[in-house]
Amino acid sequence: MNTFNEEEFQGLLNCIQDGVFITDGIGTVVACNDASLSFCYSKRENLIGKNMRDLVEEGFFDDSVALKVIERNSTVTEMQKSLTDKLDLLVTGTPFYKDGKISYVVITERDVTELGKLERKLNQLKEITEKDLYYQASMPNIKSELVFESPVMLDLISMVARISASDATVLIQGESGTGKSLIAKFIYQNSLRKDKPFVELNCGAIPENLLESELFGYEKGAFTGANNKGKIGLFEIANGGTIFLDEISTIPPHLQVKILRVLQEKEIMRVGGTKYIPIDIRIISATNSNLEDLVKSGEFRKDLFYRLNVCSFTMPSLKDRKEDIAPLCEFFLEKFNAKYRCNKILSSSAKKILHCYNWPGNIRELENIMERIVIINNADIISGESISTLFPMSNLESANHNNPTVIDLKSEMDNFEKNIILSKMKYCKTITDLAVSLSIDKSTATRKLQKHKIKL
């Protein structure tokens, strides 16, 4: 049977990717491999021949599984942090018996940091998936155009689903392009009025002198140029169903009074008419302005605001729901691949640029960009380089780009501490010398060296 000399034995230990650490029966270190040294960030000569009690006291280790094995006379397994606090280690100490007594303790150290991260990620995904399944079960009419994965949108859609089931007026606020119109349709599709008409009007897109007749209709001969048969307005067309008034803040004061009457009395009068017509509608309104500020300035009626604001919420901007950028990109890419008969895909570099962009125009801008990308790119694989010119640098996020005056204080302090230690080490040959020069104890000096990965 072959035997190994000390050098060969050490070489065999170093072939093992997990950390291996061996002590004798009283806790004195007799062997360790390179992986184990990397976890405690020390040199072999600092450990071999020393007892674990002394090494713990000197700060090379926070705790000793080997000593626990000797004390308990059994195998011990526990989770530990590396001394840099960056790694999660699964540490197992196993006793090796000779003549009924512990002769050696073999310690194995496995880096499970990534497993821990994956476990936490899986738990997060499980929670999100459970929420998503619950929402889908409670919202059977959700349409494929409503694309989201972010927790903020999951919570919002849950609330909107409850609002949909009521018959209350709804005010949707948010920046342009955040999907207010899509959410309005979602409310309608999940309401008791889903089988009745849905009428949509952008109030800001209609000239002020035509807006009243568009909403309320008019009788024949009501004004010069009017249809001689008269015209039914959108309120009447939506009767029994839902009307969505986008950009409600642009409605002039004299029309605000009439819309207030629609909400209070549930009746309208056509332009040029002499009698009221009863209607039964639900009003959903939206704006990218701050209606409360307009109320304070007198530009929007307070009583109308309260009538419209029975249920209200704000659509988050795309930069505040970054988790939704990737699925939205894939959704629009699939849409425009079908439209232009392409089969383009996004490279990882392109996805990174799309994720880092701030999207001031929100989902509408993203849709526009994705269509442009499909049209102008000749290659089937869309590279980051090919799309980088589409985005102004001022709207691309980076670690320092958002606010150059912001610094990471902890990082700066750590660098400052490391530089001081390096400068002192020019004149220090031992940990004791370093500890004296820094006016700290040996244990703290050892920890500082391990923290900054400095070898003495």
Image (cartoon, rainbow, N blue to C red):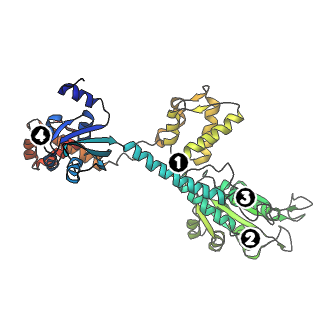
Give the mark nearer the N terminus: 2 vs 4: 2
Callout 1 secondary element: helix
Residue placed under numbered mark 1 in the picture: 323
Mark 2 and mark 3: span between their CA atoms? 27 Å
Looking at the picture, how far across and down is residue 155, in whole percent? 56, 59
The residue under the point 70% across, 32% down is: 340
Question: For residue 35, what is the image quadrant?
Answer: top left
Is the residue 52 above or below the residue 273 in the image? above
The residue under the point 56% across, 70% down is: 296
Which residue type carries mark 1? Answer: Glu
Mark number, residue 258: 2
Crowdedness near tag 3: few (<14), some (14–19) or many (≥20) residues, C-alpha within 10 Å: many
Of circles 2 and 4, the one toward us is: 4
Give the mark nearer the N terminus: 2 vs 3: 3
Q: Quadrant of the N terminus?
A: top left
Give the mark nearer the N terminus: 1 vs 4: 1
Judging depth in this view, the residue of 25 and 47 nearest the camera is: 25
Give the mark nearer the N terminus: 3 vs 4: 3
Judging depth in this view, the residue of 20 and 253 nearest the camera is: 20
Crowdedness near tag 4: few (<14), some (14–19) or many (≥20) residues, C-alpha within 10 Å: some
Judging depth in this view, the residue of 379 and 27 nearest the camera is: 27
Crowdedness near tag 1: few (<14), some (14–19) or many (≥20) residues, C-alpha within 10 Å: some
Please state if 57 lies on the left or on the right of 331 as rendered.
left
Which residue type carries mark 3? Answer: Gln
Mark 3 and mark 1: span between their CA atoms? 25 Å
Is the residue 235 above or below the residue 66 in the image? below
Residue placed under numbered mark 3 in the picture: 189
The residue under the point 12% across, 40% down is: 424
